[in-house]
């Protein structure tokens, strides 16, 4: 069964900490995405990548960075966590075959205290 | 700007009845896909149904069907014979040629036993 795996389901971090959210897919997908999901705001795109070592800013990249050293792994980094980054983070992957849409991970609920 | 609008934040339907979730979108492109995603309380987002813009025939997947009105830029989801397992957040989504998906803010569907 193909899947996208996010390393943590729940995470609690302190303000100012550097936080790593890991995402791994086993489908050999070219494209990977990070979204944050907040009530009433839906899903907002943070960063995405179409290839290894490639990254592009989404709609809300401030306070975040990403790393894609291997095709299967796409990491989201919060350089200095702040309370307004408390959110649900969703990773997704896709192929250039758009009709399949995205495959999503289970999400990481991050709380910054 | 490309947008996806879901005007119903919450809806309720009696078990075994039919419900329609509304979605409108805006895009300047002619080649795009539309999707409905379901996010149950367990959180993993799953694809319910897809529609290619070039296809006039409305997509159907078992109890789920869409009403795609391209000129009106409308893409509603109909769920027939609603079941308790249909309770979830539903997101309407638009994918253009750049492979990025734009999501609506979601409609929370409650199923009343």
Image (cartoon, coloured by chain):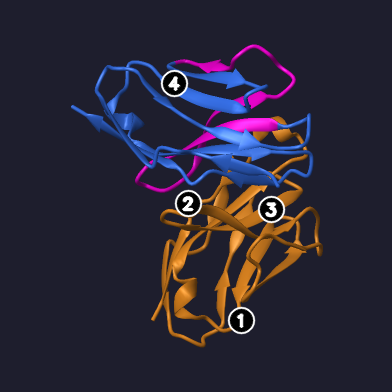
Chain colours: A orange, B blue
- Residue at (68% x, 31% y) in the render: B33
Q: Would you say the residues marked 3 and 1 are in contact, meaning their CB atoms lie under 8 Å apart?
A: no
Please, which chain is the residue tagged with disc 3 on?
A: A
Q: Callout 1: 10 Å neighbours few (<14), some, many (20+)?
A: some
What is the C-alpha distance between the residues marked 2 and 1?
A: 23 Å
Pointer 2 residue: A106
Q: Would you say the residues marked 2 and 4 are in contact, meaning their CB atoms lie under 8 Å apart?
A: no
Where, by quadrant of the figure, is residue B4 drawn? top right
Q: Is residue B18 above or below residue A63?
A: above
Magenta-colored span: B33-62
Residue B11: x %, y % from top left: 32, 34
Q: Which mark is residue A41?
A: none
Query: The residue tagged with tag 3: helix, strand or loop?
Result: strand
B82 left or right of B14?
Answer: right
What is the C-alpha distance between the residues marked 3 and 2?
A: 15 Å
Pointer 1 residue: A79
Q: Are marks 2 and 4 on the same chain?
A: no
Q: Are marks 3 and 4 on the same chain?
A: no
């Amino acid at each position: 069964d193909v899947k996208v795996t996010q390393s943590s389901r729940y995470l609690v971090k302190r303000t100012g900490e550097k936080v790593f959210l890991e995402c791994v897919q086993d489908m050999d997908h070219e494209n990977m995405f990070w979204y944050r999901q907040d009530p009433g705001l839906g899903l907002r795109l943070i960063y995405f990548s179409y290839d290894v070592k490639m990254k592009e800013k989404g709609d809300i990249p401030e306070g975040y960075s990403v790393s894609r050293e291997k095709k299967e792994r796409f990491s989201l980094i919060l350089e200095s966590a702040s309370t307004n980054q408390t959110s649900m983070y969703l990773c997704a992957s896709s192929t250039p075959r758009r009709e399949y849409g995205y495959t999503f991970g289970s999400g990481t609920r991050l709380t910054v205290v | 700007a490309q947008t996806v609008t879901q005007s119903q934040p919450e809806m309720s339907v009696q078990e075994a009845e039919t419900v329609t979730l509304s979605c409108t979108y805006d895009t300047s492109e002619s080649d795009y896909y539309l999707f409905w995603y379901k996010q149950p309380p367990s959180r993993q987002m799953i694809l319910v149904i897809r529609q290619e813009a070039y296809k006039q025939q409305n997509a159907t997947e078992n109890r789920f069907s869409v009403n795609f009105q391209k000129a009106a830029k409308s893409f509603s989801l109909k769920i027939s014979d609603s079941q308790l397992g249909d309770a979830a957040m539903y997101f309407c989504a638009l994918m253009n040629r750049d492979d990025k998906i734009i999501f609506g803010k979601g409609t929370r569907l409650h199923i009343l036993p």
